Image (spheres, helix red, strand yellow):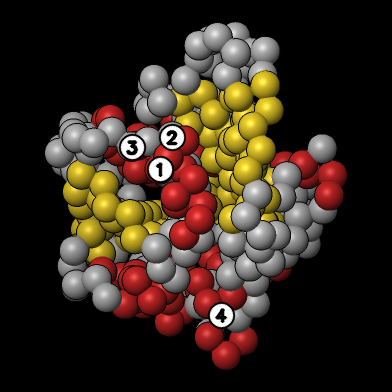
Amino acid sequence: MARSRGKQQVRKGDGGAGRGAREAVVESVDGGLAELIPDRERAGGWTLLIDGAPQSHVDLDDPRHLSFEYQRRIGHVLDLAADPGRPLQAVHLGGGAFTLARYVAATRPRSTQQVVERDGPLVQLVRTALPLDPGARIRVRTADAREALAKLPDDWADVLVADVFSGARTPAHLTSTEFLTEVRRVLRPAGTYVANLADGPPLAHLRGQIATAAAVFPELALIADPTVLRGKRFGNAVLVASAHPLPVAELTRRAAGDPHPGRVEHGRELIDFTGGAAPVADASAKASPAPPPSVFR
């Protein structure tokens, strides 16, 4: 985790459209300097940055709106995790602005959700500046993701979302077969695991994560921009895993219709994509690579 810079809060005037002149909020949290920036194009929209790296976008007026490319792709998985509107029991490892938990609450009322976020000051900032709907069944816990996962009962979750970054890197202890074995324990037999991964050329981390998931789950799919899959640039890829067959055809259709179309890899092509990478164990796990500075320019 980035070192705390001490308690600091700054509010900056903003002349954006929407609810008059909203203000940005800048505050030190455990992970660095958090900024909540008003969206000039959406009256209820806010972007969360940590040390300049975009973490989440949320629209308080329309929680169904997912602005970030990877969040839209996770949204497709959440939409297909059960019949439309059916409540889910969901776990979110990594809180950010609680965007995906808000999305589930809006699209599947009466869902029961647990959000785990290690950064306590960040949780307090988001709760204060971007409050959750008091009617939503969302419990937020301040804890390490893996430690919190170990305390959840067997077969509890319909879906488990992993979107954990320390700075701009996924911590090493959330990349191993031991971690994914715990994920599978917590999921119901037909449950779905979905993870936001980030990598760039030569894609060694991404290949290793697919091999690791394949050692625990029999069904996998990967959704990403084709340029990321070809190792042309650093970017996000959404990994989906389950013990039951995945809705690959519908995921493919939805990803292709995104503003930035994505490609879905699965089956033999996805295993071939790993290039013989070995599953990652706790003893050899490493954090995901840091993105190049140009990614956030």
Q: Are marks 1 and 3 in contact (CB under 8 Å)?
A: yes
**Of helix, strand and loop, which one carries label 2?**
loop
Q: Position of residue 293 (x, y in %)?
A: 84, 49
**Of helix, strand and loop, which one carries label 3?**
loop
Q: Give me the residue at 46% from left, 79% from top.
A: 177
Residue at image mark 3: 132
Give the CA separation, mark 2 to mark 1: 6 Å
Q: Is residue 274 visible?
A: no
Residue at image mark 1: 127
Front residue of this view, candidates 183 and 95: 95
Quarter of the picture containing the C terminus is top right
Q: Is residue 135 left or right of residue 140?
A: left
Q: Give me the residue at 64% from left, 32% from top.
A: 11
Residue at image mark 4: 280
Above or below for 30 versus 281: above
**What residue type is disc 1 on?**
Arg
Find residue 130 and name its label: 2
Quarter of the picture containing the N terminus is bottom right
